Image: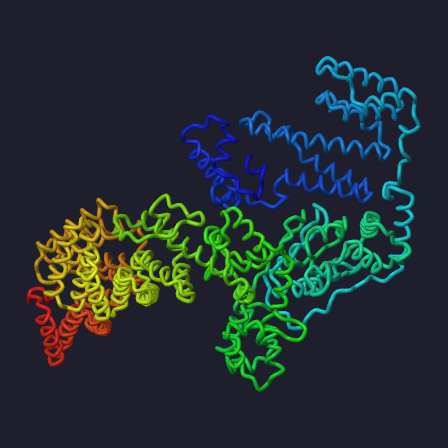
Amino acid sequence: MALLLEPGRVVPVARLVEITWDDAPPATAAHQIRKIVADLRQRIPGGAAVFVTDGPGYRVAVDDDQVDLSLFGVRLRRAREAVAAGLPGNAVDQLRAALELWRGRLLAGEGGMLLQGAATSLEERRLTAVELLFELQLGLGEAAELVGDLRELARENPLRETLRGQLMLALYRSGRQAEALEEYQRVRTLLAEELGIDPGPELSALHEGILKASPELAAPRQPTPSGPATAEQRALAQSAQAQAQAAPAPCSLPYDVQDFTGRTEELQQLLAAVAEPATQGTPILAIDGMGGSGKTALAVHAAHRLAELYPDGQISVDLHGFTPGQRPREPSEVLDVMLRSLGLPGDRIPDDLLSKIALWRMTTAQRRLLILLDNAADAEQVRPLLPSSPKCMVLITSRIRLVDLDGARALSIGVLSVPDSLALVERTLGAERVAAEPAAAEELAQLCGRLPLALRIATARLGHRPRWTIQYLVDRLSDEARKLDELASRSRGVAATLQLSYLAMDGESRNAFRLLSLHPGDLDVHSAAALLGTPTFEAEELLELLLDAHLLEQHELGRYTFHDLVRSFAHSLCTAETAAEDGLAVGRLLDNYVLAVEAACEVSFPGRVEFGIELPAPTAALPVFASSDAALAWFEREHRNLLAAVRLAARRGLDWHCAYLPRAFASFLHMQGRAEELLEAGQLAVAASRRLGDRLLLRLSLTNLAVALWQLGRVQEGVDALEQALEIAVEIGDRHGEAACRSRLGAFRNSLGRYADGLRDLEAALLLHQALGSPREEAATLISISSVSALLGKYPAAAEAARTSAEINHKLGEVDNEALALVNLANAHLGLGAYDEALAVLANAQELHRSLHRPGNASLVLARLADAHLRAGRPSEAYDYGLRALDLVWTSGSTARRATVENILGRIHQALGEHVQAQTRHGQALRLAEETGFRIEMAYALEGLGSCAEALGESAQAREHRGRADELFAAMGVPEECRRLA
């Protein structure tokens, strides 16, 4: 109920607890609130879409006409507007409809003090509406028929003097003067006994008037049921009807473009809205979207489709809300135009606004009119122009969301879809030219941001320049500095269109618009607050304002982004005068990202080595990470922004940020197998560190770069980077760095088949990690030692190293590395022939990975399960695991790992007697392994190809393949008994 009192607004959980239990909530209060919401979501059809989790609490996502309380407010507001417009009969209808929504006292006996306070406030609103209704009914000449209801309400609310006065007046006008005077005495006595006061001056004056039978208290003359409230308005209405009947039905709709394209779904929504019965008043459809998105074209196209349903006329007015060089039109001026269009002469149209509103509503009351109000500035401009008849239809277009226009159905439109964009290019430019350059046409649509205005300007330029190719214009548009100039003609342009929306904002919003555009990706409230130098709640208000003005887009809750052309326009506002402020904003943003990444790493990667690097002071609120999952989810949302921030730092010469940020989020990129991103970040960081002359940052950057190179199969380049990093670590006395470099060098050299060298590096690294008390790095090094030990046939040592690593990782909560250690333990068991033990360990590793959602490492578990089932003599089960591993490894794994999986599948095919398929798999594995220099899988692939050739009767090929395999195995020091795995 508390949520329904504020539909559309977020109510924090803490507020809901306070409302429910006042100052004495139970310890489980927040949990109970969440449980109640979950229960409501299940009980109410579509409840998940109604009760929405939003930030710190919940909100009810409903339209006004779905909540009686909201609908009550809408109708009460319309009643007051009708009163102001001199339409008391209309106001009475609205008030009756509003009060019919009440089914007794709201929240009676429910909730704590806060909820009861809200109930009291709502009851006061209801009684105020009741009093207004009786006041209007008395003003329309009603009396005797009101007495019964007034008596009942007076009994229920004995101290409300307004109700008592209305009852006295109704009795008096019904010829019951004595009863009216008795009512006064009754309330006078009650007030004296209960409150010790006399009746107020208004009630006392009414009593005196009744005693004197004052003529001022006589009932007004009853108007005709359909007539206006005054003689002058009645005459105007009669004249209007006569003039309108004599005039032809007006049609001032703009022409409908022949090449209107797309917007099928939006058009269906508009047409469907007309088909619905108008039970709640005049149908109003408000179309909003950024400048150039085609709002007017859509509205005009829909209006022409609907015109025949409105035979009394179709009126279109440009409200000049965002028109260059013109102020928005005043409602009085627009009403004058529309009344004249209905055939009323100027001398019959009153001068004051309220009279015009009344005349407009009376004139349109019985008509079927389609009214298009184009280019509205805001809801205030539109509201006086709305007819009161449900037979009319109003279409509105605006660049801003008309959130204050009650009763309107909103339709927000964005850019065109890719197919619709290409269709518009083809229709405006010609099918032949597009068919000749299809790729260029697609690129043109993207460079125009799929914005209809930009597409029409671009194709018009091409149409008037037949010697230009589409690719030629694409090349011109690819220059960011010239793009907006290219998308302009003599009469219109994208920049000019956006300028109007920009100028409509106040100075603070304009400044925020420019500063926010400096963000290189999509924003949340934290990054926005950093750029603006404001608290997050102020930043969110500015973000929402720009969203309502369609200068920002929102494709995901809490995330905001610029359309490409809007961003280009915003960047054009950055000048020499704003450079200092812009530079400070970018610095705050990058500082915020550094601190946010550090906070996320502390939660998601415990045990990281700290190097004592001084971090910037916080300038804005940081996101809070309650758990490792929350931190990793943040990394998942932000990793593209973080890489974009590194690029931004490089462009602006902010070398410290460029060098440090990749160090901070490299662990996440590595864990997720995002090797290309890690490579770019690493390269930028290395270059920035060299410019800074910071040897520690250079060592860290080279180490991260090496990891990226290894993931991409460029292992020797990774070794070169690590050797540079190791030299620096020794030089500056960075023992943690030395240990990390030796550990990685060992793993890399193992990948190259240099197992003896690799094992020496790993053992040296292990001693360093143990001496430095770095259990996380110690555990990671033990995983590599286990791998190489198994390859060299040292299975007991491999098992011991893997088991120790798994125990350390388990204590640290490093689930990912624990799973990798278990995979290596299973591999050692396989080497020892303990297949059941291997399968049991792999089952544990698989269970750990189910909670991690790491497809790259999950593929390794599946591959080893396939290998285990194969060695245990179950090739069919092995094949299923192998295919599942291949599916994952092709999307998230390294090239080397793909080679491993292909070789396992090759051995499975051999076991199934499918030697041709096995030959294909081993051939693919050989190609992948040769690309990366992964010699062990090259050798396994050649051994597999030799076995296939032998089975297929190709003896010479078999000897050649096996000879090459044995050379590789011997060079790597792999014992003969370890060369043939199945």
* Left or right: where 804 falls relative to 395: left
Quarter of image, res 155: top right
Q: Is residue 134 visible?
A: yes
Residue 530: give x, y in percent of width and height.
Answer: 46, 53
**Residue 845 picture location, percent across and down:** 23, 51
Left or right? Give the position of 265 relative to 669.
Answer: right
The quadrant in which the N terminus is found is top right
Q: Residue at x 89, y 42 (%)?
A: 230
Which quadrant of the figure has residue 77? top right
Residue placed most toward the observer, 675 or 624: 624
- Residue 431 in the image: state x and y as whole percent: 57, 80
For the point 10% across and 76% down, the residue is 963
- In this rendering, the answer to whether 251 lies above or below 162 is below
Quarter of the picture containing the C terminus is bottom left
Which residue is the extreme one toward the bottom?
A: 467
Question: Is 254 displayed left or right of 782 in the figure?
Answer: right
Q: Residue at x 44, y 56 (%)?
A: 589
